[in-house]
Image (cartoon, rainbow, N blue to C red):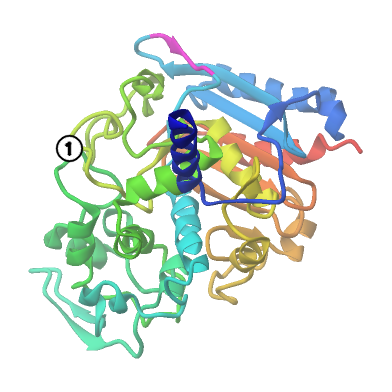
Amino acid sequence: MRNLIVIIIIALAVSANAQTGSIQTSAPLTTATPESVGMSTERLNRMDAIFKESINNGDVPGIVALVARNGKVVFHEAYGMADTESDRKMKKDDIFRIASQTKAITSTAVMMLWEEGKFRLDDPISKYIPGFKNPGVLESFKYSDTTYTTVPAVKEITIRHLLTHTSGIGYGVIDGDERFQMIYNKAGITDLFTTEKISIEESVKKLAKLPLHHNPGEEFTYSEGLDVLGYFIEVVSGMPFDVYLRKHLFDPLGMDDTWFYLPGSIADRLVSVQKKENGDWIRYPVTFYDTDYPVKGAKRFFSGGAGLSSSAKDYATFLQMYLNGGELNGVRILSRTTVQVLMGNQTGDLYGDAVAYYGLAFGVVTSKGQDAGGEGSEGTFSWGGYFNTQYFADPKEQTIGVIMKQTQGPVNDETGWKFRLLVNQAIDD
């Protein structure tokens, strides 16, 4: 009887860590031959040649690339160096700072909570984070002392605005407007990554006091809105953001390589960020951030817009869940109806690109993008990261492509666009 009680307790604990079970059961990503899923080995080998050429030419120091179709990995290779200075070769399971690829994961968590009826997408964020009440839009700015004036925004910032980069919030040090770079710096906003002892709550509450680029909903301005939503997830779920992702997304999907801060057992798999100097690849120095943030420092800042590190296989697993309509391995992360909402055009023509629009988590290819060539089928969704990582997933062709690199500074790297083209040209059914 005691053993039965233990089994029941364990079963309940396991079920509590998953989102929900599903009547659908798609297998986890497994390896198969290209031909078994309608792809050509000979054509995939064109990719191998181009990657080797890129490494030999010194365009990038190292690459990990993964291609999957119909839930089967048909290409997963590593090239070059993970750290040139120490002569460490790249391995297929190495871990990369995925930066803005974090955004889609944060958006997914938001929509998981939305499915539970915790909020409406058009709720004002001030309902949950009061500091955002009565936002102001920047009117005038003095470069001499960074003082500024604002005018009241015509509407409140909503959760949908934050998901779609239409809130008017800026992006501090990488903002395209120097005025906002200066305003954010003066206010002590933590952009992107840090080893400092600060929480996402502290940074977001500072951010709430600052002016907007424009009225919410009127323009597309790439922003720290996903950091705001990281803290919003803490408020709504009642648990730290990193814990929520681990319990409700990463563990259920088996994404054991995806973390804000890497456990010691896998920290040695982190690839170095490198830059080209006098023809050699060297480690990128400490600037406004320390590139070693995933393994050192206070480890308290859970950036919903840029903080995660992951492997190619883990990120492909996340994308496969989407291609499956929100389910993987019998775990239902999102309803397929919610996935449909996520993939819909949420920004009209504000994204300013006829070949793609922005949904609630990804850039999505339009029919014009499909016909232009090289982007994949209509409905292909994609994004990239600050340290030179890219991904895409094509629902029509059921293909996934993930290419991971770790560089900063000027590079002559064409592997991103070539990879996407080469995956598509290898389809042979």
State the residue lying farthest toward the top.
87
Residue carrying label 1 = 298
Q: Is residue 212 above or below residue 62?
A: below
**Percent of width and height locating residue 322:** 64, 51
Between 326 and 117, the one nearer to me in the picture: 117
In the picture provided, is 399 more to the left or to the right than 219?
A: right
Residue 109 sits above or below residue 55 on the image: below
Quarter of the view holding residue 225: bottom left
Structural crowding at the residue carrying mark 1, measured as other residues with C-alpha within 10 Å and reported as few (<14), some (14–19) or many (≥20): some
Residue 282 forms part of the magenta stretch? no
Could you tell whether 287 is left or right of 43 in the image? left
Which region shows up in magenta? 87-91
Q: Position of residue 194 (x, y in %)?
A: 23, 42
Quadrant including the C terminus: top right
Location of residue 290 in the rendering, given as x and y in whole percent from the top left corner: 24, 35
Task: Name the secondary structure under disc 1.
Answer: loop
On the rendered structure, is 151 left or right of 118? left
Residue 5, image x, y percentages: 45, 36
Residue furthest to the right in view is 429
Amino acid under disc 1: Ala
Q: Residue at 63% across / 19% down in the picture?
A: 52
Give the total number of marks visible in the rendering: 1
The relative height of residue 365 versus residue 309 in the rendered view (above or below) is below
Snapshot quadrant of residue 127: bottom left
Q: Is residue 299 above or below residue 292?
A: below
What's the residue at 33%, 58% (across, down)?
A: 227
Residue depicted at 50% across the width and 56% down the height: 108
The structure residue drawn at horizontal position 41% and vertical position 69%, both measured from the top left corner, is 162
Confirm whether residue 414 shows in the render.
Answer: no
Instruction: Say if residue 107 shows up in the picture.
Output: yes
Identity of the residue furthest to the left in this view: 145
